[in-house]
Image (cartoon, helix red, strand yellow):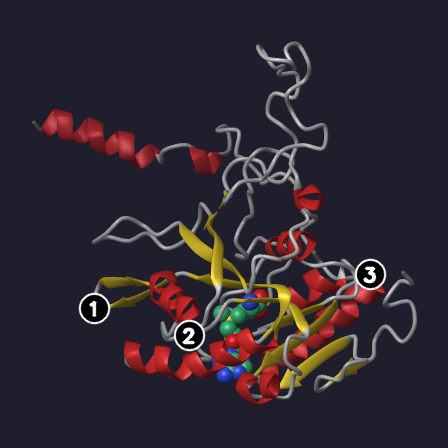
Amino acid sequence: MDKLFEHNMLDIDDAFTESSRIVLYGGDCLDAVRQIPTESIQLVITSPPYNVGKSYEHNAAFDEYLGAIEPVVQELVRVVSPQGSLCWEVGNYVEKGEVFPLDVFYYSIFKKLGLRLRNRIIWYFNHGLHASKRFSGRYETLLWFTKTDEYVFNLDAVRVPSKYPGKRHFKGPKKGLPSCNPRGKNPSDIWEVVAQDWERELWDIPNVKANHPEKTVHPCQFPIELVQRCVLALTNEGDWVLDPFAGVGSALIGALMHDRRAMGCEKEEEFLKIARKRIEDYYEGVLQVRPLGRPVHKPSGREKVCQAPQEWSEKDEKEVLFK
Ligand SMILES: C[S@@+](CC[C@H](N)C(=O)[O-])C[C@H]1O[C@@H](n2cnc3c(N)ncnc32)[C@H](O)[C@@H]1O
């Protein structure tokens, strides 16, 4: 197939057409998705608002919030192709200290619409706020649904190296032969952050915080790596990838990096502008992207921040003397 973006690569349309390659829709995603033909999108991948009081949200009662998003979900299900997938990445909604895991609530909405859950992926990150009245939250989930049983799943595109590639069958007709797949192993449904990523057995993706090369002003960006893995596994070149809550366009960039068509909708003008600029920067080769598979930095233990403050031991000594 011809490379999709060799010509007019910065043609960014503002509404969906069959021949578009990149679409950035400024406004309400429900209006935009209603204009997309039925079954024309291979992958919907998104992180919807969580109703937790971010700058782009108006805080609604929980039921009201879910009720408002349901028509969007219905439209998204309509536009997904029969071989297509829908990846819904969420965390928790918290009200007066009570935790409502959003994936639990969304699961029943998708199930009612006939979707089939293939994985509930745990995206684990080792940073975040420290809670004082419950354990600190360190993961979010990505629900991967398909519309039918005939779905695209390119496992070979996302395999990771086996932990023990030298293992052999120890009995049966294959006794003595290598037992691992030479292309590597299935990356599993836990995408962990703290160890090494991608090349190792866990899917290890740092969340986008201040020291991450992709960080923009958006308060809760997707890491592009997370999108790339879904794009590679669940779509083929030239397919459409849609993020209805696109923020600063991370899902679009993850799709464009692998020659897929990309559409995003964003209601906030500021984020939309950044999304456009990031896409332009990507094609100019100047976008800061954390390379797929780069190991996450692990402190050696010798760094100053890893040492307990001197005052703590002085305080202990004083307490002993006092007693
Ligand atoms: C959780 S953030 C997604 C961030 C995104 N994954 C990224 O990497 O930048 C949700 C985004 O959806 C946008 N949004 C919320 N409701 C919307 C709607 N009805 N239509 C379009 N965008 C909406 C918000 O402004 C916010 O940027």
Q: Residue furthest left?
A: 323
Residue 174 appears anywhere in the view: yes
Dots 1, 2 in contact, CB < 8 A: no
Badge 1 is on which residue? 96
Q: Within 8 Å of ligand 1, the CB of disc 1? A: no
Real-space Cα distance between discs 1 and 2?
16 Å
Local packing at callout 1 (Cα closer than 10 Å; few below 14, some 14-19, many 20+) is few
Q: Nearer the viewer, residue 187 or 280?
A: 187
Q: Is mark 2 within 8 Å of ligand 1?
A: yes
**Label 2 sits on residue:** 54
Amino acid type shown at disc 1: Lys
Question: Residue 114 location in percent, x, y?
Answer: 46, 68
Q: Which residue is mark 3?
A: 285
The answer to whether mark 3 and mark 2 are in CB contact below 8 A is no
**Residue type at numbered disc 2:** Lys
Q: Residues within 10 Å of mark 3 (few under 14, many from 20)?
A: few
The amino acid on which the numbered mark 3 sits, given as a three-letter code, is Gly
Looking at the image, residue 187 sits to the left or right of residue 61; the answer is: right
* Residue in the foreground of this view, choosing between 231 and 295: 231
Please name the residue shown 89% across and 62% down the image.
3
Question: Quadrant location of residue 242?
Answer: bottom right
Helix, strand or loop at disc 3?
loop
- What residue is at 18 percent from the left and 30 percent from the top? 318
**Residue 40 x/y as whole percent:** 68, 75
Callout 2: few (<14), some (14-19), or many (20+) C-alpha neighbours within 10 Å?
A: few
**Viewport quadrant of the C terminus:** top left
**Residue 248: image location, x then y, percent:** 61, 71
Looking at the image, which residue is at 51% across and 33% down? Answer: 303
